[in-house]
């Protein structure tokens, strides 16, 4: 059973996350041969205060 974790900043709509899960599942199924019902996709959303780029938190920009 493949497990996929997607890390991204919060702020996407439920519709966007639904589409992401569907497309990731399809891509993993196509490339590995695993049945879609056995593929788990986890969305790990981070707040801008918990993410930094170039030494600065995104919430501080």
Image: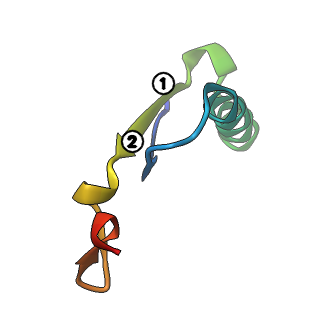
In the image, residue 57 above or below residue 17: below
What residue is drawn where x is 62% and y is 13%?
Answer: 37
Q: Nearer the viewer, residue 7 or 26?
A: 7
> Residue 52 at x, y = what percent?
28, 71
Which image quadrant for residue 30? Answer: top right
What residue is drawn where x is 49% and y is 32%?
Answer: 2
Which secondary structure lies at badge 1?
A: loop
CA–CA distance between discs 2 and 1? Answer: 23 Å
Q: Give the residue number, with chain letter if any, for mark 2.
A: 45
In the image, residue 59 above or below residue 55: above
Please state, as top left, top right, bottom left or bottom right, where the C terminus lies in the image: bottom left
Q: Nearer the viewer, residue 24 or 49?
A: 49
Which secondary structure lies at badge 2?
A: strand
> Residue 6 at x, y = what percent?
47, 45
What residue is drawn where x is 69% and y is 27%?
Answer: 15
Which image quadrant for residue 23? Answer: top right
What residue is drawn where x is 29% and y is 62%?
Answer: 51
In the image, residue 46 above or below residue 49: above
Please tell me which of labels 2 and 1 falls first in the chain.
1
Q: Give the residue number, with chain letter if any, for mark 1.
A: 1
> Residue 59 at x, y = what percent?
31, 63
> Residue 49 got which mark?
none
């Amino acid at each position: 059973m493949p497990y996929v974790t997607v890390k991204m900043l919060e702020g996407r709509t439920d519709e966007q996350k639904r589409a992401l899960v569907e497309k990731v599942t399809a891509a993993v199924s196509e490339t590995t041969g695993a049945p879609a019902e056995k593929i788990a996709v986890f969305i790990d959303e981070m707040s801008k205060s918990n993410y930094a780029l170039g030494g600065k938190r995104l919430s501080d920009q």
